[in-house]
């Protein structure tokens, strides 16, 4: 039984999708904790209602990024995570923190990386007049939004799209994509090498959607 720790900063809709899918598909894993850097994060209410341990490590309580990351790392490690999942965690993490969880920390980013890293991705896509946009799940590295890509989901950019309408369609895909990618990790099917991420074909150890 693997332990998953999820980090959020707000409503945690991707966290909800992961929790619901893990329960529905009976993953051989448990959501060991949901941790936020904001005490008023709405997602904490969902986690508490589902019996998941919660914790708050408020970045405003620490004078530097390094001190915050050290405190956050200590809190995460209390739950002995096999995987750390960033689900709308709005902090740029320091290199020592990222290295501590190398190969076992995933993030979902609302663009088709390497296009449009950083913030305001939907407006960036509209400004660039691209035909396709989407979301990317990747391993976290010290370089922001540049880790090895695990999986992507695409949506068509429609005539008349606004930042809000495009974001809404991408979010639907995020809620499908992230649980699938996390499940691959839990199954031990993700292999990272110099060529990127390869998905191994193995016999599933439990039942769920492919």
Image: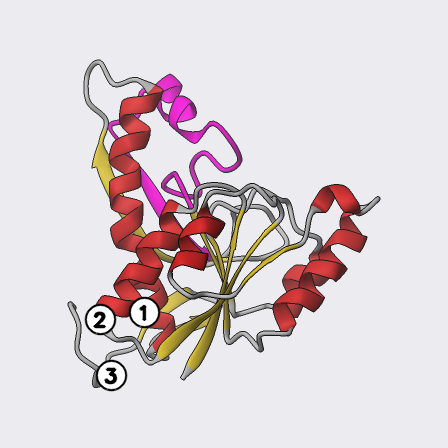
Give the percent coordinates (x, y) of residue 95: 70, 57
Q: Mark 1 points at which residue?
A: 183
Of the two numbered discs 3 and 2 in the rendering, the one whose residue sits closer to the viewer: 2
Range of magenta residues: 109-138
User: Do callouts 3 and 2 mark residues in contact (Cβ within 8 Å)?
Assistant: no
Residue at point 74% right, 60% down? Answer: 71
Whether residues under marks 2 and 1 lie with C-beta atoms below 8 angstroms apart, the answer is yes
User: Magenta includes 130?
Assistant: yes
- Point out the image quarter for the C terminus: bottom left
Residue shown at the point (31%, 20%) measured from the top left: 129
- What label sits on residue 6 in the rendered view? none
Whichever of callouts 2 and 1 sits on the residue coming sooner in the sequence is 2
Q: Is 42 situated above or below 51?
A: above
Badge 3 density bin: few <14, some 14–19, many ≥20, Cα 10 Å: few
Tell me what residue is drawn at x 59 percent, y 68 percent.
102
146 or 64: nearer the viewer: 64
Q: Where is residue 168 in the image (x, y as percent from the top left)?
A: 28, 31
Secondary structure type for disc 1: helix
Q: Which residue lies furthest to the top in this view?
A: 160
Residue 207 part of the magenta segment: no
Provide the residue designation for mark 3.
202
Q: Tag 2's secondary structure?
A: helix
What SS does tag 3 mark? loop
Q: Name the one closer to the observer, 131 or 12.
A: 12
- Residue 154 occupies quadrant: top left
Residue 54 in view (yes/no): yes
Badge 2 is on which residue? 25
What's the distance in space between the residues labelled 3 and 1, CA to CA?
Answer: 13 Å
Q: Separation of disc 3 and disc 2 at Cα?
A: 17 Å
Residue 94 appears left or right of 177: right
């Amino acid at each position: 039984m693997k332990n998953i720790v999820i980090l959020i900063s707000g409503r945690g809709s991707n966290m909800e999708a992961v929790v619901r899918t893990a329960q529905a598909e009976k993953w051989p894993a448990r959501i060991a904790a949901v941790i936020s850097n904001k005490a008023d994060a709405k997602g904490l209410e969902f986690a508490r209602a589902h019996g998941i341990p919660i914790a708050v490590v408020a970045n405003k309580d620490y004078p530097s990024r390094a001190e915050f990351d050290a405190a956050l790392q200590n809190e995460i490690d209390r739950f002995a995570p096999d995987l750390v999942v960033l689900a709308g965690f709005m902090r740029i993490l320091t290199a020592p923190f990222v290295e501590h969880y190398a190969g076992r920390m995933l993030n979902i980013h609302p663009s088709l990386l390497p296009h449009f890293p950083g913030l305001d991705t939907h407006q960036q896509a509209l400004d660039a007049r691209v035909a396709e946009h989407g979301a990317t799940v990747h391993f976290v590295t010290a370089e922001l939004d540049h880790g090895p890509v695990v999986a992507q989901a695409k949506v068509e950019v429609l005539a008349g799209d606004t930042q809000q309408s495009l974001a809404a369609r991408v979010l639907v895909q995020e809620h499908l994509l992230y649980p699938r990618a996390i499940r691959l990790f839990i199954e031990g099917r993700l292999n990272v090498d110099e060529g990127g991420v390869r998905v191994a074909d193995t016999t599933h150890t439990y039942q769920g959607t492919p």
